[in-house]
């Protein structure tokens, strides 16, 4: 191989490496986005819609079961025995609803002293 051909191959190799890094970094950033607050909200809306068996825009104890209802009924602002997505969002914003960690403990963050 001539020196020019080796140089071209080196330049092409560097360009390929940069392209692979850029694609990988973009994919990683997209994956991290889904775990952020925006992604969490979209997943919560999807869970709400999945739990809303009759698609009336409300969750009831009959639709979600005793355990889940015991946790989310604090969001029932108008005490009509059903919870809308807006009520859920407001309760979350007010701190009435907290995330459950993987072990089922409400509101405890991983690594905290009382977890």
Image (tube, rainbow, N blue to C red):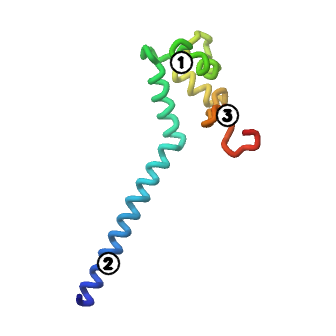
Q: Earlier in the sequence, mark 3 or mark 1?
A: 1
| Foreground of the two, 45 or 105 | 105
Q: From the viewer's perspective, is 22 left or right of 111?
A: left
How far, Cα to Cα, is label 1 from label 2?
Answer: 59 Å
Q: Earlier in the sequence, mark 1 or mark 2?
A: 2
| Foreground of the two, 51 or 104 | 104
User: Where's residue 109, x and y in %?
Assistant: 67, 41
Q: From the viewer's perspective, is 51 left or right of 13?
A: right
**Tag nearer the camera, 3 or 1:** 1
Secondary structure beneath dot 2 equals helix
Of the numbered discs in the image, which one, if any, rests on residue 76? none
**Tag nearer the camera, 1 or 2:** 1
Residue 14, image quadrant: bottom left
Q: Is residue 6 above or below residue 39?
A: below
Quadrant for the C terminus in the image: top right
Secondary structure beneath dot 3 equals loop
Residue tagged by mark 1? 64
Residue tagged by mark 2? 11
Q: Is residue 78 above or below residue 102?
A: above
- CB under 8 Å between discs 2 and 3: no
Q: From the viewer's perspective, is 55 left or right of 97?
A: left
User: Where's residue 98, x and y in %?
Assistant: 64, 31
Q: Is residue 61 above or below residue 94?
A: above
Total marks in image: 3
**Residue at point 35%, 65% (across, down):** 19
Residue tagged by mark 3? 107
Q: From the viewer's perspective, is 18 left or right of 48?
A: left
Q: Assess disc 2: are there few (<14), some (14-19) or many (≥20) residues with their C-alpha within 10 Å of its C-alpha.
A: few
**Residue at point 50%, 39% (across, down):** 38
User: Where's residue 15, x and y in %?
Assistant: 33, 71
Secondary structure beneath dot 1 equals helix
How far, Cα to Cα, is label 3 from label 1?
Answer: 20 Å
């Amino acid at each position: 191989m001539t020196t020019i051909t080796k140089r071209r191959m080196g330049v092409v190799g560097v360009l390929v490496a940069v392209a692979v890094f850029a694609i990988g970094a973009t994919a990683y950033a997209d994956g991290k986005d889904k775990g952020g607050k925006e992604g969490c909200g979209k997943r919560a809306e999807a869970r709400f819609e999945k739990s809303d068996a009759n698609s009336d825009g409300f969750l009831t104890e009959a639709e979600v079961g005793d355990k889940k209802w015991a946790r989310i009924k604090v969001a029932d602002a108008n005490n009509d025995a059903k919870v809308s997505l807006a009520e859920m969002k407001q309760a979350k914003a007010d701190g009435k609803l907290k995330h459950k960690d993987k072990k089922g403990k409400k509101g405890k963050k991983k690594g905290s002293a009382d977890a």
